[in-house]
Amino acid sequence: MDYLTRDEVREMILAVCREVQQNEQHLCQLDSYVGDGDHGSTMARGFRAVEKALGEPGHDSIDALFYCTAEALEEAMGGAIGPIFASLFEAAGDVCQGKPRFGAEELRSALQEGYDAVRDIGGAKPGDRTMLDALAPAAEAAETACGQGLTLPEAARAAAEAARQGAERTASMVAKKGRARFLGEKSLGHQDAGATSLAVVLGAVAAYCSH
Ligand code: ADP
Ligand code: MG
């Protein structure tokens, strides 16, 4: 599958919704070591709202699907993390404006623009132990994949694997942002919840693109 159509993008986002909900407990547990233990419930609540919103009529373009996702996430998740995850999907909407298909190039720019948006909104940088530590290597991997002329499934798998490894590396980072920053070195030894979420999201994207 070199490109996704609008209907396939919708199915891909719905696959992400299911995967996030399946990881609810795991994500809460990761957040409980260093945060307040709600990250999984917040993510699941957000992506349940996305499922509902995408089930309504309308969304007749790929960008509309991503904007709808962003809006549902921002509304349902709230807090600081709502706008952060929403900005990623909003960036995907921006790069897909007027595009009838979603391919490796759209994935690459969505991750790049998404990274810039999350960094600007949250003010974190790589190494602060946030979801950016998964998003930055994912964006880089997609960039490399596009430079090599790889297909959408290959680029998506490369980005997902880079996010997975990036999330793993957060286990050796001390938190500098969010609630976890108050716990300092207690954050050592466990993966960051938000970075793990990002890896879950991209894992579902890669699985959908490869099926
Ligand atoms: P809260 O911290 O309000 O309880 P969540 O538990 O849902 O929100 O989310 C926690 C996650 O948010 C962290 O694991 C981290 O990855 C992410 N995060 C926190 N602050 C930032 C930031 N400034 N930029 C990007 N991600 C962040
Ligand atoms: Mg939390």
Image (cartoon, helix red, strand yellow):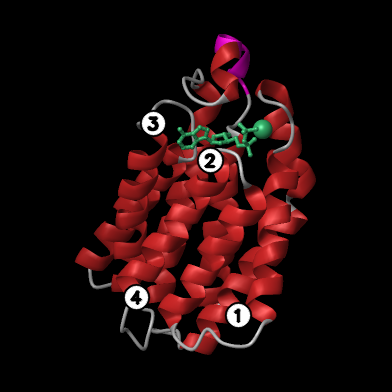
Q: Are the two marked residues, 3 and 1, in contact with CB atoms closer than 8 angstroms?
A: no
Task: Spot the residue most to the right.
Answer: 25
Quadrant in which the C terminus appears? bottom right
Which range of residues does the magenta coloring cover? Answer: 183-189
Q: Are the two marked residues, 4 and 2, in contact with CB atoms closer than 8 angstroms?
A: no
Q: What residue sits 53% from the left and 40% below the top?
A: 195
- Mark before the other along the chain sequence, 1 or 4: 1
Q: Give the alpha-carbon distance from disc 1 to disc 2, as whole Å.
A: 23 Å
Q: What residue sits 67% from the left and 82% below the top?
A: 56
Vertical placement of residue 82 versus 19, above or below: above
- Mark before the other along the chain sequence, 3 or 1: 1
Question: Could you tell me which secondary element the residue under label 1 belongs to?
Answer: helix
Q: Quadrant of residue 136?
A: top left
| Mark carried by residue 96 | 4
Q: What residue sits 67% from the left and 60% below the top?
A: 47
Looking at the picture, which amino acid does disc 2 mark? Ala
**Of the residues tagged 2 and 3, which is closer to the observer?**
3
Quadrant in which the N terminus appears? bottom left
Q: Does mark 2 have its CB less than 8 Å from ligand 1? A: yes
| Nearer to the camera, 141 or 94 | 94
Q: Is residue 39 left or right of residue 153?
A: right
| Mark carried by residue 195 | 2
Q: What residue sits 49% from the left and 40% below the top?
A: 131
| Mark carried by residue 108 | none
Looking at the picture, which amino acid does disc 1 mark? Glu
Q: Which residue is mark 3?
A: 124
Q: Which residue is mark 1?
A: 11
